[in-house]
Amino acid sequence: MSSRGLLPLMNLVRLNGVPILQQLQLEERLLRTSSHNWCIVNDGTNEPTIVMGISGKPAELLEIGSVLQDKIPVVKRFSGGGTVIVDHQTVFITFICNTDALPSVQPYPRPIMSWSGQLYSKVFQGVGDFSLRENDYVFGNRKFGGNAQSITKGRWVHHTSFLWDYEMMNMGYLKLPKRAPDYRQARDHSDFICRMKDYISRQEFINRTISALGSQFSITPPELESSDCPDDTKFVPSTRLLGKQELEECFESESGNVILQSL
């Protein structure tokens, strides 16, 4: 416990432009090898990258031909959730918590999602028409934040990709998912998502988030090389970059299925 009373400690890590693969592997290591609470803020990533959930299938979710042609990296992360394309205009915020740090939050997807929705309701107070809709953060009926979670014994991670801005052409690498929230109503990306920059500045958003988190945790900046974050050489992350050959095989399989269906 901290000198501020009964608030649990939260280690705050501020990153800027760290590759999303590196960020996700750090998160996975902290979730599985650390015993502390962490908030990771990464302001942008270094290059456009597609990130898929652990059970995502490239052939169902990606325009693989275009992805291969334009050499867009594809990462499969350790958590569930949907598929996004991120770049330097995306803001990433991750919470890694011990379940006993927030005893009122049951370690299941919906309670964790509800807790995060309430936290961001404080962040966006007076900003747009914010709400949590079917696991998405939205202004009105347009999405600007996609979430994913991973829950282990005694710990969980909740991470979000916030679309502060985006290139509409990059959305063309993603197929419309077969499973989509009801409120999407089959809208394409241009009608379904919106830009946070039309509502709030990047720095104000980050500052508000840290301030809101400070009402529930005592926040401290850590030394990532310290014993609080062990460099466990035995730990092998499941988050990985999909290889070109793997994507080519998915593309060839998809192309074969299309030919068969047309016969």
Image (tube, rainbow, N blue to C red):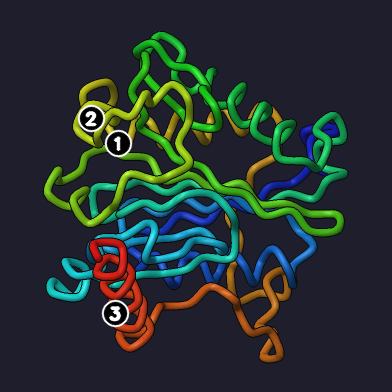
Q: Nearer the viewer, residue 194 or 45?
A: 194
Q: Are marks 3 and 1 in contact (CB under 8 Å)?
A: no
Which residue occupies 13% across, 71% down? 70
Q: Position of residue 155 (x, y in %)?
A: 78, 54
**Disc 1 on helix, strand or loop?**
helix
Q: Amino acid at mark 2?
A: Lys
Marks 2 and 1: CB-CB under 8 Å? yes
Identify residue for label 3.
252
Which quarter of the picture shows residue 8?
top right
Q: Which residue is mark 2?
A: 197
Q: Nearer the viewer, residue 216 or 22?
A: 22
> Is residue 151 found left or right of 118 in the rendered image?
right
Point out which mark residue 81 bears. Answer: none
Q: Residues within 10 Å of mark 1 (few under 14, many from 20)?
A: some
Instruction: Specify whether 127 is left or right of 118.
Output: left
Q: Residue furthest front?
A: 263
The residue type indicated by label 3 comes to: Glu
Mark 3–mark 1 Cα distance, whole angstroms, equals 41 Å
Relative to 69, residue 196 above or below: above
Image-quadrant location for residue 29: bottom right
Left or right: residue 100 compared with residue 237: right
Tag 1: residue type? Arg
Against 217, residue 43 (above or below) is below
User: Does residue 196 show up?
Assistant: no
Q: Residue at x 24, y 69 (%)?
A: 259
Q: Which of labels 2 and 3 is toward the front? A: 3
- Across and down, in percent, residue 129 comes to 39, 11
Mark drawn on residue 202: 1
Say which element carries label 2.
helix
Q: Secondary structure at mark 3?
A: helix
**Residue 158 position in % (x across, y down):** 61, 46
| Residue at 51% across, 58% down | 53
